[in-house]
Image (cartoon, rainbow, N blue to C red):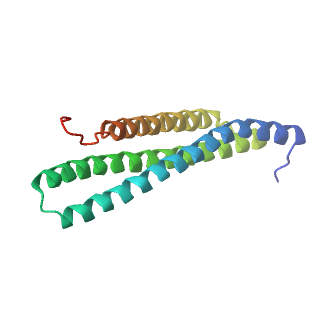
Amino acid sequence: MLTFNADEVTHGIQLAVAPVFLLTAVSGMIGAIAGRLARIIDRARLVEDRARESNDPEFLQRAFKELAELRLRGRLANGGIALLTFCAFLIGLTIIVLFVGETTGFQISRWAVGGFLSGVVSFLLALMCFLAETLIATRLLNFHLPGKG
């Protein structure tokens, strides 16, 4: 029969609260990237519809180039969401491991450290996807003004 010491449970909860703040950041990032992905999809649909109706070779060339960049941006956004989801999973496991380790006496703190660090690495990789996607998006800012390439 397991017995729980109130001080151990309290300390376990305190340990588990710190990673929860990372989960808050992850959820905010997922929301931001999901919003960007929705806009990418909407833009791609608009460009595709206009390309189907156009016979202008210059416009079609620009449209196909933009669609290729939108596809890349979409892949980066999907990758970022996948990494953030994996990060949240790892942080959730870390919280469980910290709490179980603190309240039961199992020596599994290395698992908690590994899970937390893996989650942070996943979060950083997701940020890199986000940065790459936004750099590509701002590179697209070409208003096709006369005399501009």
Q: Height in image: 104 above or below 38?
A: above
Screen quadrant of the N terminus: bottom right
Screen quadrant of the C terminus: top left
Q: Position of residue 143 (x, y in %)?
A: 29, 42
Looking at the image, which is closer to me, 70 or 118? 70
Is residue 124 among the parts visible in the rendering?
A: yes
Q: Height in image: 56 above or below 14?
A: below
Kindly identify the residue that appears in the image at 40 percent across and 51 percent down: 78
Looking at the image, which is closer to me, 20 or 104? 20
In the displayed structure image, the side of residue 92 where residue 122 appears, left or right: left
Please identify the residue farthest to the right as the structure is shown: 6
Q: Position of residue 30 (x, y in %)?
A: 53, 48
Kindly identify the residue that appears in the image at 30 percent across and 50 percent down: 70
Please identify the residue farthest to the front as the structure is shown: 146
Looking at the image, which is closer to me, 50 or 96? 50
Kindly identify the residue that appears in the image at 36 percent across and 37 percent down: 138
Looking at the image, which is closer to me, 138 or 29? 138
Kindly identify the residue that appears in the image at 62 percent across and 37 percent down: 112
Q: Position of residue 27 (x, y in %)?
A: 59, 47
